Image (cartoon, rainbow, N blue to C red):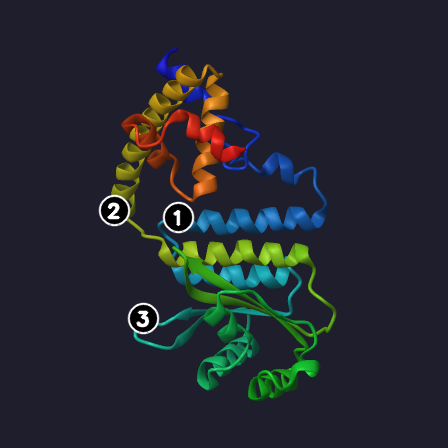
Amino acid sequence: MSMTSTIEACRRPQRLTNPHHEEVTPYAQDVPDATSHLVDALSAITAQLVDDSSDSGSTLYQIAGTCVNVLEADAAGIMVVDPRGGVAVVAASDERARLVELLQTQIDQGPCIDCMRTSEIVEASDLHEITGRWPDFTSAVLEAGYRSVLAVPMRLDGRTVGGLNLLYTRTEGISAHDRGRSVILARLAVLGLTQEVGEPRTGRLAERTMSLLNDRVHVGHATGLVAGTLGIAPAAACAALEDYAQGNGVALRDVAHRITEGTVRPAELLVRQS
């Protein structure tokens, strides 16, 4: 079995983890308007993430605007944990939303504050019904004209680093679909905050590319070893490696190292799946 065949066996387009699905324009042409608008918005945001002329601030403002234009929120704001202590407002779709977000940081109370503390999504579909939970915040936000809110934590490496807050002037419940899309935008906000620009990013890309290529070769070795030992096809061996990695919360390259070093036997991959 050649190294090329074992590496190619790991390219399984049916898996969600496959990275080779970047072109979205043909898809956007054949989908409903709402989804097309989301694709367009995500395309604009990700374009900023790879453009050295953009900064984190502009990306975050674009994300706040997308919450209004695509998710049909009436306003949105983004808070982050201040390394010096406390919480800070870094972006808002408009001035009224900025003041609502700023209020939460000043009184240390509100849905976005709670979502950052608990690292869980906080939803209030009718603020009139929960005035006791955030009494000062609720009074002010109702006076500002908002009736419901959705707060989504922004996480990095398992730690909450901020929150995305969506404000609505209506009291109807927020759909699971919109909650899911808001999580995507919250993750993009984290990427916007962590982006490097200029030469440091270019240099880091070269380092990571070399590391990725080395990892793929090592995974290829492990795939061949598993396939040969168990007498299964390379694609099945690669699937077993990936399933073991996902099931145990470890990187695929680490599983490959364990297989080649003998600390994990090929047969254990199948046992963990059963």
Question: Considering depth in this image, is 41 or 89 the residue closer to the camera?
Answer: 89
Going from the N terminus, do you reach mark 3 or mark 1 first?
1
Q: Amino acid at mark 1?
A: Asp
Residue 104 relative to residue 170: left or right: left
Residue annotated with mark 2: 199
In the image, what residue occupies the spot 46% across and 23% down? 237
Q: Position of residue 188 (x, y in %)?
A: 48, 54
Question: How many residues crowd around disc 2 within 10 Å: few (fewer than 14), some, or many (20 or more)?
Answer: few
In the image, what residue occupies the spot 49% across and 16% down? 233
Q: The C terminus appears in which quarter of the rendering? A: top right
In the image, what residue occupies the spot 31% across and 51% down? 197
88 is higher (above) or lower (below) than 229 = below
Residue 149 relative to residue 1: left or right: right
Q: Amino acid at mark 2?
A: Glu
Q: Position of residue 95 (x, y in %)?
A: 53, 77
Residue annotated with mark 1: 51
Residue annotated with mark 3: 83
Query: What secondary structure is found at the residue carrying circle 1?
Result: loop
User: Is label 3 in contact with label 1 (beta carbons under 8 Å)?
Assistant: no
Q: Is residue 78 visible?
A: no
